[in-house]
Image (cartoon, rainbow, N blue to C red):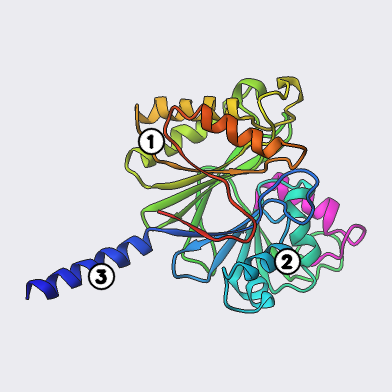
Amino acid sequence: MRILAFLLLTCFVSVCSAQNSFRVVPLGVRGGGDDGNLSAYMVAPVNSNAYVCLDAGTVTNGISKALTNKAFSVAADVVLRKYIKAYLISHPHLDHVSGMVINSVEDTAKNVYGTEYCIETLKSHYFNWKSWPNLTNEGASPALKKYSYKMLGEDQEVDIEQTEMSVKIFKLSHSNPYESTAFLIRKGEKYVLYFGDTGPDEIEKSDKMQQVWKAVAPLVKAKQLAGIFLEVSYTNKQPDRQLYGHLTPKWLMKELNVLSEISGAGSLKGLNVIITHMKPTADNESQIKAELASDNALGLNLIFPEQGKAFELK
């Protein structure tokens, strides 16, 4: 009887753990000129094939790499057309949208979530019949209605259709006055936080990141935040005046120290921080990794994602 009870308890804990985990398949991890490996992350609850794609700089090349790494056991077109249920676009720069735009002709009907600023740019500059056919439900005629725009406002949580997840957004400053977005994704009582490109508050002369930290500090305290995706584009050698709305290791740690001050000393120890958007120039990536490691007084679990290699966040 005791053995049976133990087995049932083990099974229950295993199921609960899976329900409180996210699976991430990076389709692209870099910023800059690596046009086959640009920001795009498929995220779903573990044991689900209903993914959102957080940004979409690279799509099909990333899916191909994921298949090579056995992240999926289906054909590439199934991943594109059936597994990706929606795109969440942080901002409309090419290295965050080009994969979605190029592949829209072969794709199936999906929602594209973003802020008014992001969606209006997609309408005006991409899906406009000049840059690309208008495969969306709004904008230049004829609107072919394959993709549907879903405009997101702050201070609201929205269910992501065809998935088990919901999203809340925070606006970011990406070289003021230009705008980017952070997405707080929830499944049950567990969350992941994804930042699009962002500059530090001190340089951007804003409080955008501080507002995000205030909102997620209770989740950090309660161990409900499974991970933070945060960009580091340059090494510490990059002059502050030439950050162009990006972070360095120094500025990432300064910002996370703000979160630590709000959520409590030691609260960030072991927190998964996924480093995104490193520029692939010279020894930029290796230097960023070294600088982050040497300045990790908070005890963060730093994750450097690789294109096509799936991982879990718990």
Residue at the right extreme, as displayed? 130
Alpha-carbon span between mark 3 and mark 2? 37 Å
Q: Residue furthest left?
A: 1
* Element on which disc 3 rests: helix
Q: CA distance from mark 2 to mark 1?
A: 36 Å
271 in the magenta segment = no
At label 2, which amino acid type do we have?
Thr
Q: Separation of disc 3 and disc 1 at Cα?
A: 28 Å
Residue ID for mark 1: 269
Mark 1 burial class by Cα count in 10 Å: few <14, some 14-19, many 20+: some
* SS at circle 2: helix
Image position, residue 158 (x, y; %): 51, 55
The residue depicted at 37 percent of the width and 58 percent of the height is 20
Residue nearer the viewer, 267 or 139: 267
State the extent of the magenta-drawn residues as a range.
114-135
Task: Say the numbered circle drawn on residue 11.
Answer: 3
- Label 3 CA crowd tier, 10 Å (few <14, some 14–19, many 20+): few
Q: Which mark, residue 146?
A: none
- The residue to which callout 2 is attached is 60
Quarter of image, res 199: top right
Q: 189 left or right of 94? A: left
Proximity of marks 3 and 1: CB atoms separated by less than 8 Å: no
**Mark 3: amino acid:** Cys
Q: Classify the position of the N terminus by image quarter.
A: bottom left
